[in-house]
Image: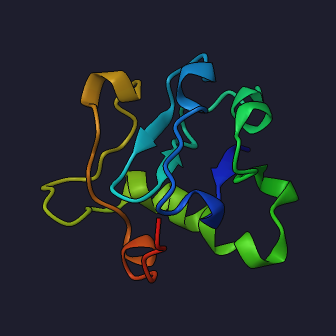
Amino acid sequence: MTYVIGSACVDVVDKSCVPECPVDCIYEGDRVMYINPDECVDCGACRVICKMDAIFYETDLPEDQQRHLADNAAFFTEVLPGRDAPLGAPGGSATVGRIGVDTPLIAGLARRDG
């Protein structure tokens, strides 16, 4: 089980969740943040602090956010544009920094005016 970041984070990337995560499992794409399901310890600290109410426990995802469950996992298991291999579970976002690309789902969404 894991927490999932939904569409309310797209083009906002508030990052208030990042320092709250005790295992550093929240990674920055280009337009959204992603939670690594293999590194997440299900503590919920990210959900509590999220100003956008964009983070859900996977079993609590609203119907319109279900696609983000597989998409969050795909960020780590599929080869992203401009990369040679899947990101996998590198042991914390601080070790790899900003990834700067998104999954096809997020990349294909219309941009929000900020």
Q: Which quadrant does the N terminus fall into?
A: top right
For the point 13% across and 62% down, the residue is 82
Frontmost residue, 52 versus 21: 52
Which image quadrant for residue 35? top right
**Residue farthest top in this picture:** 22
Q: Could you tell whether 42 is left or right of 18 in the image? A: right
Q: Could you tell whether 72 is left or right of 79 in the image? A: right
Up-down: is 97 above or below 35? above
Frontmost residue, 89 versus 110: 110
| Residue 59 image offset from top left, x and y in percent | 84, 56
Q: Could you tell whether 98 is left or right of 23 in the image? A: left
For the point 68% across and 27% down, the residue is 41
Which image quadrant for residue 75? bottom left
| Residue 91 image offset from top left, x and y in percent | 40, 24
**Residue farthest front in this picture:** 114
For the point 26% across and 51% down, the residue is 100
For the point 69% across and 43% down, the residue is 2
Q: Could you tell whether 64 is left or right of 81 in the image? A: right
